[in-house]
Image (spheres, grey):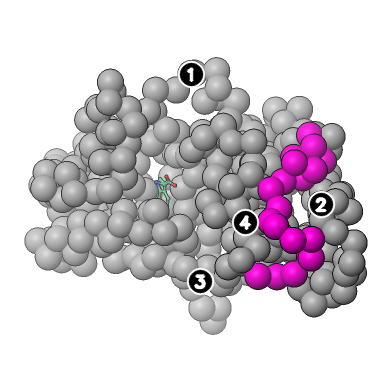
Amino acid sequence: MEEKKKVMLSGIKPSGDLTLGSYLGAIKNWAERADKYDCFYFMADLHAITVRQNPADLRRWTLAQIAQYIACGLDPKKNTIFIQSHVPEHAELGWVLNCYTMFGELSRMTQFKDKSAKNADNINGGLFTYPALMAADILLYQADYVPVGEDQKQHVEICRDIANRFNGVYGDVFKVPEPYIPKVGARVMSLTNPTAKMSKSENEDTGRVCLMDRPEDIMRMFKRAITDSGSEVRFDPENKPGVSNLMQIYSSATGKSFETIEREFAGQGYGGFKLAVGEAVVEMLRPIREESERLLADKAYLQSVYREGAEKASAVAARTIRKVYKKVGFIER
Ligand code: TRP
């Protein structure tokens, strides 16, 4: 008998273009995961509106992200790709879990504190209860693993606390998930500030390359990339963070080792090296950009993907919500 695969789930807020950093650091390795895990990926539009969004942008980003993930190799036949608001059980379980999440716990969340500081004119209830909705996202699918970055670990932690609290009262309703730390992808830093991570929405940083950027823009960004004093292409993140970051990117794009790269550019200075990295990135991203554009133009196809995804997701989510409603004492309709 075929063994049941473990469930993996991740949400992505549709709030910006995907970057070279998220591609090399994570997404690139997602395609092959589907063989081992039952994977759910959803566009977290309910979470996105905890900060004010322009409706047209939100619509555009949501579709663009689906297209970009598929273009990066996520196969919609092998993975469940859907839009959070299409599966109403997220909001439903989110409400129930709100009632099992404490004011004190929510007040201690670092993301809430950070975002309240940044959006002082819009510290809304949704921003505060964000972790309860995220717990619902995860627990609805009885997920075993949640791949997250450092900044989201606390949210998985509170999800576990909520699940254990609920299970403690009602018996084993939820699988208690674990954070999943993927085997190391490249850690790509900003091209203009190589000691900070290349991030998608934080700042309109010129050091950020997006998957949809045009080749001439990518080349311009690499030509302007910050390097270090000296002129030697050598991997030394401590003393040469700029050059080391470029080497990391070049190595991921071409598969060449650091030693090979050092030999290739020995005695050539930084100028030629930066051009070579830019060109390698352009060639690596070209098929992804072209495929994303092709998919984005095919609205009927995208629609079939997110509809099928929502259907598959709903089947699982409905089972969990039925169980939860019964446990807490709601009358079946
Ligand atoms: N909070 C996550 C982020 O900002 C997005 C997210 C929403 C998520 N629901 C999730 C991630 C469930 C993992 C699992 O990146």
139 with respect to 293 (left or right): left
137 with respect to 78 (left or right): left
Determine the secondary structure under disc 2. helix
N-terminal-most mark, 4 or 2: 4
The quarter in which the C terminus is drawn is top left
Q: Are marks 4 and 3 in contact (CB under 8 Å)?
A: no
Q: Main secondary structure of the magenta part?
A: loop
- Stretch in magenta: 217-236
- Of tags 2 and 3, the one toward the viewer is 2
Determine the secondary structure under disc 1. loop
Tell me the residue at 18%/49% (across/down).
Answer: 108
Q: Which disc is residue 54 wearing?
A: 1
N-terminal-most mark, 4 or 3: 3
* Amino acid type for the residue under numbered disc 3: Lys
201 with respect to 171 (left or right): right
Mark 1 surroundings: few (<14), some (14-19) or many (≥20) residues within 10 A? few
Q: CA distance from mark 2 to mark 3?
A: 43 Å
Quick check: 100 above or below 150? Answer: above
Mark 4 surroundings: few (<14), some (14-19) or many (≥20) residues within 10 A? many
Which residue in the protein does label 4 denote?
188
Mark 2 surroundings: few (<14), some (14-19) or many (≥20) residues within 10 A? many
Q: Which disc is residue 5 wearing?
A: 3
* Amino acid type for the residue under numbered disc 4: Val
Residue 18's x, y, as percent? 62, 42
Does the beta carbon at disc 1 come under 8 Å from ligand 1?
no
